[in-house]
Image (spheres, rainbow, N blue to C red):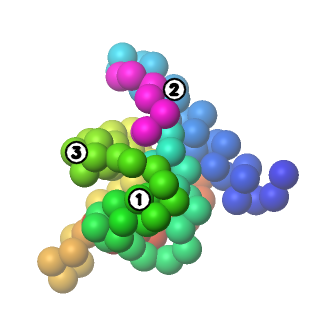
Amino acid sequence: MDGSQKLKKQVKEEFMEYLTLHKHRKTPERFAILDHIYSIKGHFDMDSLYKSMIEVNFRVSRATLYNTIQLLHDCGLVVKHQSGGTYLNMRGHTGTKTITI
């Protein structure tokens, strides 16, 4: 298992623990979004994330996308930083990942 696969496994476990603790549903869509975020290299915004998920034939509503990003933020897997009107999200304590939403 390479480094990115280990990181994906670790963040999935952390997210699952958070969802269980806070009594949120563990839906395939939430985990697909999490996996997709950690498959993207570099920055992206919510529109490009939505479009890239559609391109790989994974239909997800924008509401689900925004709600999942908020859950990822709430559980500490994504940290929001405002920079010039955009939000930069950086991966928390188990690695580094920068995304723009």
> Are circles 3 and 2 on residues that touch, CB within 8 Å?
no
Q: Nearer the viewer, mark 1 or mark 2?
A: 1
Q: Residues within 10 Å of mark 1 (few under 14, many from 20)?
A: few
Q: Earlier in the sequence, mark 3 or mark 2?
A: 2
Residue at point 28%, 46% (across, down): 61
Side (left or right) of 7 relative to 91: right
Q: Is residue 95 above or below residue 61?
A: below
Asked whether residue 92 appears in the rendered view, the answer is no
Residue at point 15%, 77% (across, down): 85
Side (left or right) of 7 relative to 62: right
Asked whether residue 11 appears in the rendered view, the answer is yes
Side (left or right) of 20 relative to 66: right
The residue that mark 3 highlights is 63
The quadrant in which the C terminus is found is bottom left
User: How far, Cα to Cα, is label 3 from label 1?
Assistant: 14 Å
Q: Earlier in the sequence, mark 3 or mark 1?
A: 1
The span shown in magenta is 24-30
Q: Nearer the viewer, mark 3 or mark 1?
A: 1
Considering every residue shown, the one lying at the far front of the view is 57
User: How far, Cα to Cα, is label 3 from label 2?
Assistant: 22 Å
Q: Nearer the viewer, mark 3 or mark 2?
A: 3
Residue at point 51%, 26% (across, down): 17
Q: Secondary structure at mark 3?
A: helix
> Are circles 1 and 2 on residues that touch, CB within 8 Å?
no
Query: Percent from the top left, x then y, of residue 90?
Result: 42, 64
Q: Amino acid at mark 3?
A: Ala
- Of the pair 79 and 51, the residue shown nearer to us: 51
Q: Which mark is residue 17?
A: 2
Q: Amino acid at mark 2?
A: Glu
The residue that mark 1 highlights is 54
